[in-house]
């Protein structure tokens, strides 16, 4: 038994066209997740697992399939993450704008803020998953990135 993800898929039907920067972040998050993660649904005995991640009707949905084809679903309110996701989008927009026309010192300061908001979102996600799915902090960070991608309208 192994408590990790071997495949992750986003609900592409709910995502509109993304910028090159967002698509890069998505690809990096998925590659990093598949390279190293800790993921253990409490209702399942063992993995590895495949995850289909989607958002529907204000709910964050984790559709999980284990190696033995067992299935589980965690449906969570997205509300606790909405403000953090909004803040993260705003600071990312500032960051990408700054990359084009600002001093390296200002870009670094904005990036520090961006990482801080990203950490806050990761911690909030871990709290939201508590009692349902155990994930370590790096896994929560990468999942938070993917949740942000799903929020793009």
Image (cartoon, helix red, strand yellow):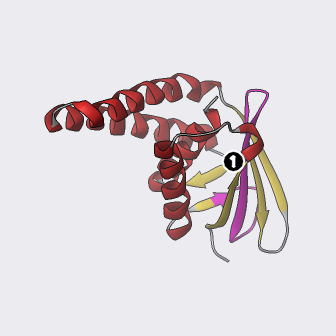
Instruction: Report the residue marked by disc 1.
Output: 132
76 on left or right of 30: right
Identify which residue is drawn at 69% across, 39% down: 15
Q: Is-magenta flag for residue 7?
A: no
Q: In terms of image quadrants, where is residue 114?
A: top left
Q: In the displayed structure, would residue 117 be above or below residue 46?
A: above
104 on left or right of 75: left
Q: Which residues are magenta?
A: 40-61
Between 98 and 60, the one lying in front of the other is 98
The quarter of the picture where the C terminus appears is top right
Residue 110, image x and y in percent? 27, 32
Residue 97, image x and y in percent? 34, 30
Between 148 and 97, the one lying in front of the other is 97
Q: In terms of image quadrants, where is residue 135?
A: bottom right
Q: Residues within 10 Å of mark 1 (few under 14, many from 20)?
A: some
Between 125 and 50, the one lying in front of the other is 50
Q: Is-magenta flag for residue 46?
A: yes
Q: SS for tag 1? A: loop
Residue extending farthest to the bottom is 1
Residue 112, image x and y in percent? 27, 37
Between 21 and 54, the one lying in front of the other is 21
Identify which residue is drawn at 54% across, 48% down: 23
The quarter of the picture where the N terminus appears is bottom right
119 on left or right of 46: left
Identify which residue is drawn at 45% across, 55% down: 138
Residue 43, image x and y in percent? 77, 56
- How many marks the image carries: the answer is 1
45 on left or right of 33: right
């Amino acid at each position: 038994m192994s408590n990790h993800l071997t495949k992750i898929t986003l609900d592409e039907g709910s995502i509109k066209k993304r910028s090159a920067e967002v698509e890069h972040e998505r690809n990096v998050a998925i590659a990093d997740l598949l390279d190293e993660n800790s993921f253990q649904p409490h209702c399942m005995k063992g993995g590895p697992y495949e995850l289909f991640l989607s958002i529907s009707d204000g709910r964050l949905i984790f559709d999980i399939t284990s190696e033995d084809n067992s299935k589980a679903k965690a449906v969570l309110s997205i509300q606790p993450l909405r403000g953090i996701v909004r803040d993260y989008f705003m600071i990312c927009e500032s960051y990408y704008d700054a990359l084009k026309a600002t001093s390296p010192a200002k870009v670094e300061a904005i990036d520090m803020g961006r990482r801080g908001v990203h950490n806050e979102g990761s911690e909030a996600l871990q709290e939201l998953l508590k009692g349902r799915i155990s994930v370590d902090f790096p896994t929560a960070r990468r999942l938070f990135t993917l949740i942000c991608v799903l929020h793009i309208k």
